[in-house]
Amino acid sequence: MAPIELTYFPVRGRGNAMKLIMYDQGVEWTDKVVTIEEWMKGDLKKTCLFGQLPKLKDGDLVLYQSNAILRHLARKHGLYGKDGKEAALIDMMNDSIEDLRVKYLRMIYQEYETGKEKYIKELPGHLCYFEAILAKCPSGFLVGDKISFADYNLYDFLVVQKILCCKCLDNFPSLKGYVDKIGSRPKVKAFMESDSCTKLPVNGNGKQ
Ligand SMILES: N[C@@H](CCC(=O)N[C@@H](CS)C(=O)NCC(=O)O)C(=O)O
């Protein structure tokens, strides 16, 4: 049995970026899928440190909080820059991706009907920062010359934004090139085209 076990709902959600990292880095893991019906019984929730998923079990280490999980995988698999300075910059990038993800999730779960149009209108005003960052990165990665966990996270987020609004990257050539570049890594491509990704709804409430 794989030593890593990921417990999450049958959605892409916050689980997809960590799955992408594991698949691309050749890490074996087992998915423990929790249906909403099972979750609603409440027993599993009570055992979760903060009452939420995802949960990653790596040997005797049990982790909650998706960004802590991404960072753990990054430390183990060399996806955290070449030194402390790059690690700090990667953290900064990832925090900014998290800010956007929270905005997106708020719209999806709390105000899809009333807030979707406004969200799409405001999206370029958020994405432009990443466009400017990537336009200045000769490697095509957010920080340094190697892929980091923040790159997988941003890639995952941008793909989800394209599902919401297929034209959202049209005015952002660097972001477009970035999605194409990361998306054409053979294992990333294979994972994104696999049932493990395509068969799952993007979000738990069916909105996307
Ligand atoms: N900050 C947490 C948020 C986790 C979170 O919102 N989990 C949701 C699913 S994505 C959840 O467990 N919802 C069920 C519940 O809160 O009862 C993280 O990044 O992991």
Image (spheres, grey):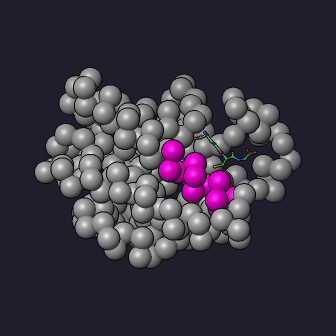
Horizontal and vertical percent position of residue 26: 33, 48
The quadrant in which residue 148 appears is top left
Q: Point out the stretch of residues depicted in magenta.
A: 99-109
Report the residue that reaches farthest toward the bottom: 167
Give percent across and percent down for residue 131.
30, 57
For the point 20% across and 30% down, the residue is 82
Assess whether residue 202 is covered by the magenta stretch: no
**Is residue 11 among the parts visible in the rendering?**
yes
119 shown above or below 60: below
* Ligand 1, image quadrant it occupies: top right
Residue 43 location, quadrant: top right
The residue shown at (51%, 68%) is 121
Where residue 120 appears, as percent x and y from the top left, is: 52, 68
Q: Quadrant of the C terminus?
A: bottom right
Q: Nearer the viewer, residue 49 or 176?
A: 176
Q: Is residue 53 left or right of residue 80?
A: right
Q: Is residue 2 visible?
A: no
The percent coordinates of residue 157 (x first, y second) are 45, 57
Asked whether residue 105 is drawn in magenta, I would say yes
Count of numbered labels shown in the rendering: 0
Residue visible at 71% across and 70% down in the picture: 113
Q: Height in image: 172 above or below 167? A: above
Residue at the extreme right of the image, as rendered: 41
The secondary structure that dominates the magenta segment is: helix
Q: Of residues 34 and 166, which is closer to you in this image?
A: 166
The answer to whether residue 189 is above or below residue 13 is below
